[in-house]
Structure formats: C-alpha cells, structure tokens
Amino acid sequence: MDPLDRIDEIIAIVEAARSVPMSRTNCMVDRGEMINALDQLRAELPSELRRATALLDERDKIIDAGRREADRIISEGEAEHARLVSVNEITVSAEHEGARIVAEARAEAQRLREEVDDYVDTALANFEQFLTRALASIERGRDKMHALREIGTFTGEENERPLPF
C-alpha cells in the first residue's frame, strides 16, 4: 500500500473513533490498531526513500550520458572543424562551420543539463511534498495518541474505578 494511503487509513481510524464524553476534540482509538497502522507506515517509508535514491541515481546516469554525448558532439565538431580548416579553398567557411557546430554542441549539452536538472528538481519536490504530508500526518497522530494517553490516565476519586472507555 502507498504510504499516503496508509496515512489516509490512520486518519480514518482517528476520525471514526468514539469521542471522549464532554470533549469536542478528544477521542478514543484502539491502541493496537493505531500502533499496527503506524508500524506498517514506518515499514513502507524506506521503500519510498529507495525510490528517491533510485531517482537520484537515474539523474546521475542521465547527466553522465548527456555529458558523454556533449563531449562526443564537441569532439566531432572539433574534428569537422579541423578537417574543414585543412582545405585551403574553404578555410574561412570551415572555421565558421566548425565554430557553429561547437556552439550548437555546447548549447545542446547545456539544454540537456537543464532538462535533467528540471526533471530531478520536480521529482524531488514531489517527494518532499509527500514526506511533508507524511510527517504532518504522523505528528497529528502522535498528538492525538498523547492526548488519549493523558485522558486514559485520569482515574477520578481514590475509590472510584476508571471509566470503561
């Protein structure tokens, strides 16, 4: 199950919980059920972290491939430039053509780098949003759990038994 779905499940458990008498904000949840749901969420988060690491690895591979391609294009441009320069009749046009090819190669390499950076930035931003929502949900769950724990420790008078809820 997706960690966001797991968080939705935890929220549903809390929303469906019975209210504590005379309280608008406090409720009672099954501790075992809540701990089980949180444990499952904790188990799922590492897979999301592995996905983020895989995205970073993929980005590095794309950048390396782009650099190799840019180097290849630049080398071809320089080789073409050198070949054209060696021919006396077209020396001037060869210099211009070689420079154009090198400039295009550099521009293409820069464009590829920018596209990869944009892609990775978007992927990381999406993952950051996911983690932010997950952390906020966990914090809300913990706050509710702490509030329930405080309510559960109230026993009232010395000879009275604790409330059954």
Image (cartoon, grey):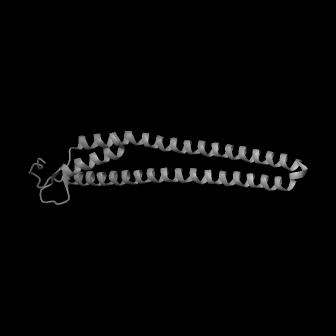
Q: Residue furthest left?
A: 160
Q: Residue at x 38, y 39 (%)?
A: 43
Q: Residue furthest front?
A: 89
Q: Nearer the viewer, residue 112 or 144?
A: 112
Residue 35: percent from left, percent from top: 28, 42
Q: Nearer the viewer, residue 11 or 59?
A: 59
Q: Quadrant of the N terminus?
A: top left
Q: Residue furthest right?
A: 88
Q: Residue at x 88, y 47 (%)?
A: 86
Left or right of 66, for residue 89: right
Residue 9: percent from left, percent from top: 27, 45
The answer to whether residue 153 is visible is: no
Q: Nearer the viewer, residue 34 or 52?
A: 52
The answer to whether residue 80 is visible is: yes
Residue 56: percent from left, percent from top: 54, 45
Residue 90: percent from left, percent from top: 86, 52
Q: Residue at x 38, y 52 (%)?
A: 135
The image shows a total of numbered marks equal to: 0
Q: Residue at x 70, y 53 (%)?
A: 104
Left or right of 36, for residue 120: right
